[in-house]
Amino acid sequence: MFDDLIDQNPPVQILNTLVSRGSLPHALLFSGGTGVGKRQAALALAMTLNCESEKRPCGVCRPCKKIKAASHPDIIEETPAGKPIKISRIRDIIQILSKKPNEAKNRVIIINDADLMTPEGGNALLKVLEEPPDRSYFILLTTQKGSMLKTIVSRCQTLYFQPVSKSAILSQLHRHGDISEEKAEMIAQIADGNLSLALKMASQEDLDPTILSGGRIDLLKSLVSLKECSTGYLLSMARDLFKNKDRIAGLLTLMKTCLRDLIVIQLAPEKVINRDLTETLAHLCESQPIDTLLKRIDLIHTAERAIQSNANLRLTLEVMIIRMSRV
């Protein structure tokens, strides 16, 4: 039923059991990191609930095709793109639910980044979850379950999606294209369980200078020398990042990985991700207090959240680099 989901056996088994027994709850919460298959699972479940074939989902019947094409009138998907989900949008959804489905056997409401619901929006949705309309199912997706209203979480059955294993990512990288072992290994390490990011990085031919040794060594040296850099040089670093805005997610992940390794090499060297740079890491970490490295990682997290909220990219990167130089 959910055969295309990679390395997610526990939630897949639960969903298969719930559907086969006819005991699927009207509210589900898919919790887990980015790029692990939560949305893919939600769409597969929507297809399963509306498929016209005996083998569900078939992927080829009319409802399945329309759901895959995001053109089914009764499959409502909310994607906030980093912006708060306000009560007005929840009311719009409630208004739609007050009417009969256009053609679906079961109406499905998918809310991406459900943790972005405002308290007012969450409370409005709570009333619907307490008395859901017939043949209507809610699937909430989140990477930050702890930021959601506890009352919303309590009304949902939570399924946890784990980070995709390195071996599974490597398998998918080789399956989706001709890629060297060295590049695949490094992408799988940097992606850190995010399959979507790994596949995106693998498709970018110009990523090699960043991934391979020379690029990472230069990046490491830059990250440990931020305090000694002039403002002009810091701004040039931000400008270089901005020039690569199409792959900024991968670059910021790589920066976090490098900073993480500078910490790990001091505590548990065997768990370093960039193992081919162990000697360089051991040398550079000598001047890097762990507290400073942790604060810099946190600043990158802050920048990532701002970018997801559609903040000005160049300004966000400049602020991030300058603040990293001051801790």
Image (tube, rainbow, N blue to C red):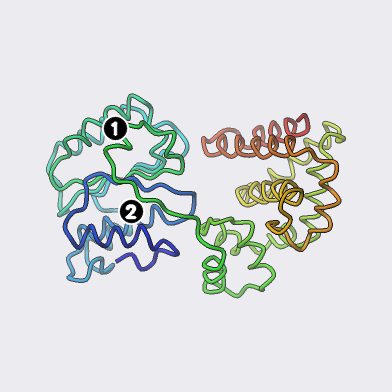
Q: CA distance from mark 1 to mark 2?
A: 19 Å
The answer to whether 121 is drawn above or below residue 189 in the figure is above
Label 1 Cα neighbours within 10 Å, binned few <14 / some 14-19 / many ≥20:
many
- What mark, if any, has residue 42 been given in the picture? 2
Q: Secondary structure under badge 1? A: helix
Which tag, 1 or 2, sits closer to the chain's start? 2
Instruction: Tell me which residue sits at (76%, 30%) in the image.
Output: 327
Please identify the quarter of the rendering in which residue 239 is found: top right
Q: How many marks?
A: 2
Instruction: Name the residue beneath numbered marker 1.
Output: 90
Of 278 and 133, which appears nearest the observer? Answer: 278
Instruction: Tell me which residue sits at (87%, 35%) in the image.
Output: 228
The picture places residue 212, in percent across and down from the top left corner, at 75, 62
The picture places residue 21, in percent across and down from the top left corner, at 17, 60
Q: Nearer the viewer, mark 1 or mark 2?
A: 2
Q: Is residue 304 left or right of residue 263?
A: left
Q: Secondary structure under badge 2? A: helix
Kind of residue sitting beneath label 2 = Ala
Please identify the quarter of the rendering in which residue 69 is found: bottom left
